Image: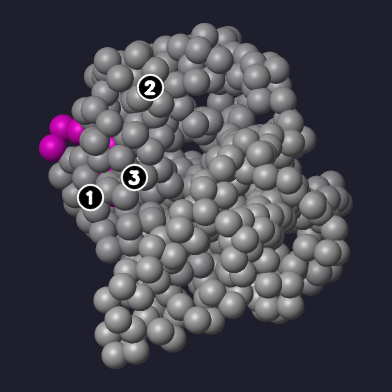
Amino acid sequence: MNFKVGRTLMLMLPWKKTWPKSLGKKARVKCKLFIRMVLEVMYEVLEEPAEEVEIKAGPQVPQSLEEFVAEMKETRPDARTFATELKTMVTLLEQRTRKAKIQEYLYRHVASSSIPKQLHCLALKLANEHSNNAAARLQLPTPECVPYLVDNSFFHFVLASDNILAASVVASSLVRNSLQPERVVLHIITDRKTYYPMQAWFSLHPLEPAIIEVKALHQFDWFAKGKVPVLEAMEKDQKVRSQFRGGSSAIVANNTEKPIVIAAKLQALSPKYNSMMNHIRIHLPELFPSLTKVVFLDDDIVIQTDLSPLWDIDLNGKVNGAVETCRGEDKFVMSKRLNSYLNFSHPLIAKNFDPNECAWAYGMNIFDLDAWRKTNISNTYHYWLEENLKSDLSLWQLGTLPPGLIAFHGHVHIIDPFWHMLGLGYQDNTSLADAETAGVIHFNGRAKPWLDIAFPQLQPLWAKYVNFSDKFIKSCNIRPS
């Protein structure tokens, strides 16, 4: 069939509305058959597998719809050529779009996984200050406040972080919004390398009358006594992941997976997923044997209200008070069920869990430590970490939430979503007005508020708790975006 599509389209489209007036019955039938033949040829070409279509890369391929239409008007090709040219252009543009999207995800991965030079600068300057300034080496807390660290009449919060700037915002927002700051005790857990800079910061920036404790993991008696199951699992995880995942270059080189799948795999390579700061929450009962209840805080949150009412919430014998994530107006954030995190194509997962069961959020959790000590939650967590390693990391997406969903299964009490708004670090459609109504906002995702890739309309909610005139902040060139 060698008819000219350009002329055909010009003739067919304006005639369609006027056929009854300008054409007889036979002519209308012929036109319909003609159009059907043209469409069948075009569909035949467009439905062929992309690899069977000859792709001619180069400047001769139209770069836009406008160029394509102009070329078709000039050359007046037949239907098959028209469809082939269209498919060639669309295929090439899809390839370029896919490549650009993957590059964007890769750059975001690098940006979110690397330590910004400003944060590195801050840690170095504070470490130097700790060495040279006695005021930066104060005991935290002061000796007269030490008994309050185990006093259950106080509000005890736990923050695990190796990010000094992020920890300072959590602490400042917690104390400034507290109606009873004199009853607030914040236990900051960090690693060995960050301990002295973290201590220097909070020695030089006291948040009185709140009580701040800074402690490194190696200073906990329980942690130093012997084997720590989660540490052993993390070491194995690192080895398996390096062999199984192949690193970011292998992930990006995959030509068959969708960009969103590649993005998820890149995010799984983030150092935070293999950080002890992220896993330490599963050992809270052992780390704080004298405490009965704590609120655990991630370091990428901002507190916008008084959190003392959390101690009045009756958990009804449950261990973990958390916001569930399968209900709410925001379908992208609040639509997470177990099948969002666990691999239900694996028989071990399918046999033990319901894919439609609602998930819940880490980041702001009330933990009843007395109730926890009566359960097998920590051992369950370690058991499933081992099972995931045996399965080549195929039971869930990498991270601490999936094994947490399993370990705390049946031990979660759902609290009001006001206490924890999620998603401010991976989507930009949360409005400032909505975010301001939440008690706690969580920048979970890559776009952390201290990074250049933070969403500009939300970043001020975090930046308001940073004193940009502070000498350490200024000297490290930390500025609001």
Q: Give the answer, above or below, for where 320 lies relative to 440.
A: above
Going from the N terminus, do you reach mark 1 or mark 3 first? 3
Chain part drawn in magenta: 316-323
- What residue type is disc 3 on? Lys
The circle drawn on residue 211 is none
Q: Is residue 400 magenta?
A: no
* Mark toward the start of the polypeptide (3 vs 2): 3
Residue bearing the label numbered 1: 415
Tell me where residue 339 sits by quadrant.
top left
**Dot 1 or dot 2, earlier in sequence:** 2
Residue 129 is situated, as x and y percent measured from the top left of the image, at 82, 54
- Who's the residue at 72% across and 25% down the image? 246
Q: CA distance from mark 1 to mark 3?
A: 16 Å
Q: Can you identify the residue that label 2 sits on? A: 345
Relative to the observer, which residue lies in front, 53 or 267?
Answer: 53
Distance, label 3 to label 2, CA atoms, is 17 Å
Residue 253 screen position, x and y as percent: 74, 36
Relative side of 412 to 192, left or right: left
Residue drawn 52% across the image and 9% down it: 390
Mark 1 residue type: Ile
| Residue located farthest toward the left when viewing the structure as drawn | 316
Which image quadrant: the C terminus?
bottom right
Amino acid of disc 2: Ser
